[in-house]
Image (tube, rainbow, N blue to C red):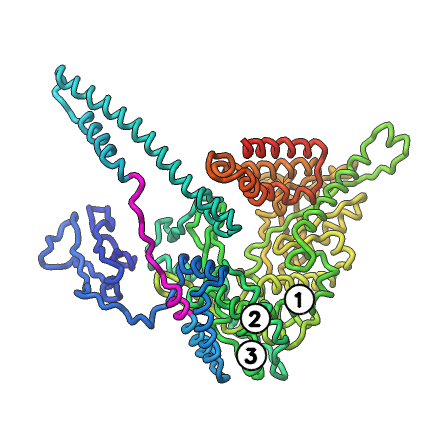
Amino acid sequence: MVLNSWSHQLGPTYVHGDQASRIDHICVRQMFADGEARRVKYLWDSPFLQQTDVGHTPILSTIAKYWIPSFAQQQIQRVTLQQRQTSRLAFQSQSLDWQRFVHHSQAQLAQSFVCTSADADSQMDHMHKQILQTFCEHFPPRQTKRSDPAWIPALPMILNKWEHRRRMLRPGKGDLKDVFQKWFHVIHFQQLKRSHKKQAKVIRQQQFKEIVQTAAEAAAQHDTHKLFNLINRCAPKQPRKQIQLRNHAGQLASPVESAAIMYKFVADTWAGPSSLDLTFVQAPGVPFTIHQPQKALSMIPITRAVAKPFAPGIVWRQHAAFLAPILHDQLRFWWSHNPPLIPSSWRNGWLFMIPKPSRPPVQPDHLRPLALQEPVGKAIIGLLIHLAMKDAHAHVVPFPVWAYAAHRSTLDAIRRVSIHCAQVRDLICQQRSTPHSRAARTTRHQLYGGLQICLDLRRAFDMVDRRKLFAKLHCLNIQTSVIQLLSTWHESCFYLVQHGEVDQPVPVGRGVRQGRKAAPGLWTFFTILFLHELLVHVPLTWIQAHLTLYADDFHVAASFTSLAEFDFFHQTLGILFSTLTLMDMQLNPGKSVAILELRGSLSGAVKRRLVQQHASGAVLKIEVPGQADVYIPIQRSTKYLGVIISYSNFEDASLTHRLQLMKVGFKRLQKWLTGHHSLTVAQRFSIWRTCTYPIFSYGVFATGMTQQGILKAQTQMVIMLRQICQ
């Protein structure tokens, strides 16, 4: 590690007139880079330094002579990927090692809850510490023996090749002897270069065959996790991006600057009150039976990640039947208090940032936050959210909310929007003047068409006001005890932001934390409460007919056959935007899209009044009561939940889009699907059906397909299948 890179106040180490730079560094091993060593000083005024406008500065630092390792009990024990894989295989086979671990850990669980304690934090921390230590004793981390690289046998040939190149480029006398010597080296360099390419190709093929052989064995054993893990490792969906934050000057941030940038981003994004200021008359008690937490614990995913201080989820899934009654008794004691006792490890989240697919990971706004949780508390709060969703079911059903609700999915939202697009397209076709329409005396409208807007909300999940949300949950007929537990769960909670070996707690007082088990349910409740506010201004039938809500994707659309209908819809859009502002949502007009189709004799006047031309193109003017006007860019088509929507041939456009994505997925797996290796045709077809075909089939059955589109899809799939079967 570089010791003099931890503080930007140190300045440069080299000056040359008006130019300066930091080019001198003290580098030590990480174990020696303690706080004292990082207190670096520059000796610009040292008596032995000649003061000129050009030169380097001496650097002074104190480095420990001996390294004394920190006490092992103070370090957070981590579970490696190899330990998780070994334990998962042991769990699936119920091996003898796994049985020993289960027997030992069950005794520790019973001992941890032998007596009820009001100190929930220390009790849960002690339990997790013991279970994690026992897990690491039975499944210790092992250093995998790295075999020699495959290119080691070719090392003499590689060195010989580059030696011929060096001698070939070495300056000579230019006489006849020198020419023949250069010719000799050129010939041998070209021969060795061709031989090296052939050998490298053979090595790559051999390595891939070994990986495919392992994948074939996993497929024969029906180990889909191992199979697709190998596939994704060798053919990733996108290149791995390393997070490299930059400071305000656009330069790569130092470790200290990166930590400060991340801490400030988390603190500013989720800044809010630590308390919700809600009072309840009595203690909540336990609102579920013993069997319900057992079911919740038994549904903990085997392969999902958990926060680093805790044992993997597979451990708690194994102990579901044993732990549920013990935990239920403990919860009865904790939740008999007012306010109820909830361990800090259940309320906190370990923040994990991943790059967004289409943005460079150089600033926190381009990262997606995920909160890893403690597995037992995650299962319990998931159970509470499930009970709350059951209580609020009658309020969810009447509204067009299609995410995070039972018996509703993305296809329902896509189907509603597709039906609207088809209706407007049919309306325009019916209004065309043709001999048949004139003979049928079809009613001609002065203004007709359709308008749909896809709204983009800026950090919607993070902008939720918790006080407003929890203060109105009773309006959804949710049990008071469940509201009390959920509100206490979201008080005095922190994100633990990791930087290096340090976890810095940052208070979190706003927003629905993404990655948390309660996030989908709480966002659904927030959406329903938003629609309740909207009901003050518009009837329920308008919401059911014109709104389509899927998570934070808001779609509003209408068809009209008169100027009055269009004006009413346009005014209602302003009310919709003002209601979003009332609920602390921030609209992002630049990323929102409007698709407008106006026909008829009055269409020109309406466009002159509401459509304006900006530098980026045409925009639609929306008048918001009490606020500034909003301008939404107008486009002919746009993407919505993975399909293409427009008022033209959106079916074929969506099908073409899905086929293009399927081709990309097929090309990514082409070596696995069409190569000459040990995977059978049945196994290749299974991989294609699991990984490639769903890319195409998603959404196209909801949008519908034309006859031409069906033939095109059949052609492309037959081409792929023929390549697989060759």
Q: Quadrant of residue 626?
A: bottom right
**Amino acid tagged 1:** Met
Seen at 44% across and 43% down, the residue is 213
Name of the residue lying farthest toward the top: 176
Marks 2/1: CA–CA distance:
14 Å
Q: Is residue 360 left or right of residue 255?
A: right
Provide the residue span drawn in magenta: 132-151
The residue tagged 3 is: 331
What residue appears at the point 85 percent right and 37 percent down from the top-left corner? 444
Query: Earlier along the polypeptide chain: callout 2 or callout 1?
Result: 2
Q: Quadrant of the C terminus?
A: top right
Residue drawn 65% across the image and 31% down it:
712
Residue receiving disc 2:
380
> Does residue 623 lie above or below 666 as drawn?
below
Residue 251 picture location, percent across and down:
35, 49
Query: Among all residues in the image, which is located at the extreme left?
Result: 48
C-alpha gap between disc 3 and disc 1: 21 Å
Q: Position of residue 52 (x, y in %)?
A: 14, 50
- The span from disc 2 to disc 3 (Cα, nearest Å) is 10 Å
**In the displayed structure, would residue 254 be above or below residue 295?**
above
Would you say residue 268 is visible in this rendering? no
Dominant secondary structure, magenta:
loop
5 falls in the magenta region: no
Looking at marks 3 and 1 on the same chain, the residue that comes earlier in the sequence is marked by 3
| Residue 147 is covered by the magenta coloring | yes
Q: State the quadrant of the N terminus.
A: bottom left
Q: Secondary structure at mark 1?
A: helix
Identify the residue position indicated by label 1 in the image: 389
How would you rate the neighbour count of disc 3 (Cα within 10 Å): few for under 14, some for 14-19, many for 20 or more?
some
N-terminal of the pair, mark 2 or mark 3, is 3
Q: Are marks 2 and 3 in contact (CB under 8 Å)?
A: yes
Q: Position of residue 236 (x, y in %)?
A: 46, 44
